[in-house]
Image: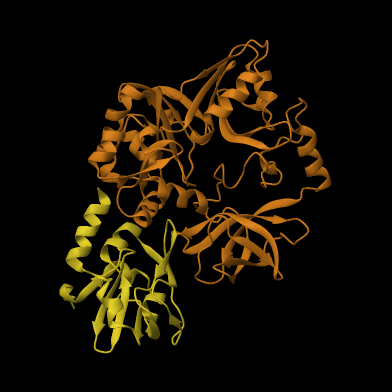
Chain colours: A yellow, B orange
Amino acid sequence: MTTDMTKVLCTKSHEYLIKEGNTLKIGVTDFAVEQLGDVVFIELPEVDSSFKKGDIFGTIESVKAASELYIPVSGTVIEINEKVVEQPELINNDCFGEGWLIKVKDFKEAEIAEAMTYDEYKEFIEEEEH
Amino acid sequence: MVMGNEKDLKKTALYEEHKKMNAKMVPFAGWEMPVQYANIIEEHLTVRNKAGLFDVSHMGQIFVSGKDSLSFLQKLVPQDISKLIQEKAVYTQLINTEGGIIDDLIIYRLDENRFLLIINASRIDEDVKWLLSNQKDLDVSIDNQSNNLSMIALQGPVASDILENLGLTKENQPKRFFIKETKLSNNDVLVAGTGYTGEDGFEIIVKNEEVGKLWVELLSKGEKFGLKPIGLAARDTLRLEAGLFLYGQDMTESTTPVEASLVWTISKDKKEDYFGKDKILSQINQKNESKRLVGFKMLDKSIPRHDYRIYINNEDSGVVTSGGVAPFIGENIGLGYINTDKPTAIGTKIDIMIREKLHPAEIVKRPFYTHN
């Protein structure tokens, strides 16, 4: 299944969020995955844990290093992707689809509005690289 | 790691070749080096199953010659260099007056009175300073050729077939831990049967001006054998899986070779005095070292990393010096130091503190991997 990229919002720390009704699906962007290389370990929070925007909600590890994951919105975790914990390579294969990380509820619309569209994010990356 | 200004980074003679192959370049020990050409795990497995080509030109080459060469070197290392026959190589360490490791290196005996020392890139300045300060009035010349020579490592089960395809017959190739001065595609080279991957293979030393065409020729003549260029990231996972140490992490000036579990590299019956000898022999004979290097594997899916703490029975008991994934054996493994008031035997259950949680691990035999 291909992702509708117009629905993808991104942060400067390379997480994305996709709104699906009352829940938000959160993961890491394709750019982040490309930078990381092979994802070999992923640590996700417990279901029902609550976070404030910008909190560390997990860790993603490539062969080279461990990186922290920052939650783009405040909210409560209602589901984690157990499949990526077992098969972290799903993140490399399909980060916006099968490689999603957590789903969150009770978020604030205003916080979502602070994220970039995917097109804005691509511009942001290009500026970062120069 | 802060490695200084990127503008100050040195480039090897193969820099343009790496760029052509779209290698990702990173700073390492003051050099701009290829960290990966494609995928790290694939590069790792290529070396285990076929063969890989590494640019290791950042490493240092020092030639020691003169009639006092042997006695000069005997003073600096715990190995008995007098036992080195011509063309033979040995792994050893430069030791300071306190018994600490200044660097680890391979010494090759090229001739009765001529030796080659291959040393770590990050330690070239320190090593040269140390060698010069011990030159005194000995008849010995210390010739640091690191800036004029390049080095390529050809590693993996088919490395020998590839050299043969370049015209160096198997009878003329150096055996493991030997070195030969020879020709390879009309270039004057030193070919050594050494490496840092746990595989059979060679390290080829050649002048900077000649390395480019040799690199290209090796890759093209090695292609049908599955040869690929390999970056520093896979070099690190390969050496860790083979239980080989990285200077600056697994040993430093404040660790002795006994603490680093390198007793097997010390000649116990060496008559000559060498720096740190009393300390080293006392640690061997009285087992009074305060820490000891061990290898361990994780018992869950977590990944140990440099600087994580090691716990035994819920007590902080040591530190991880190298850790990561071992792609060929499919385990997450590490090296670390444990205080010797704690058990360090193989099979001991330990824990690694990762992000404020203890994760189970077990001390295991090193190397983690041996080919065949």
Residue A88: x and y in percent read 37, 71
Residue B348: x and y in percent read 69, 66
Does any portion of residue B85 appear in the rendered image? no
Residue B166: x and y in percent read 31, 31
Q: How many marks?
A: 0
- Dividing the picture into quarters, in which one does residue B78 lie? top right
A7 shown above or below A60: below
Does any portion of residue A18 appear in the rendered image? yes
Please tell me which residue is depicted at 61% across the width and 13% down the height of the picture: B140
B319 shown above or below B211: below
For the residue pair A72 and B168, the one nearer the viewer reads as: A72
A1 shown above or below B82: below
Left-right relation of B209 to B270: left
Q: Residue furthest front?
A: A110
For the residue pair A73 and B200, the one nearer the viewer reads as: A73
Left-right relation of A4 to B210: left
Left-right relation of B225 to B257: left
Residue A100: x and y in percent read 31, 76
- Dividing the picture into quarters, in which one does residue B95 lie? top right
Please tell me which residue is depicted at 24% across the width and 57% down the height of the picture: A125
Q: Residue furthest bottom?
A: A22
Q: Residue furthest right?
A: B286
Please tell me which residue is depicted at 62% across the width and 55% down the height of the picture: B336
For the residue pair B67 and B306, the one nearer the viewer reads as: B306
Please tell me which residue is depicted at 25% across the width and 73% down the height of the picture: A96
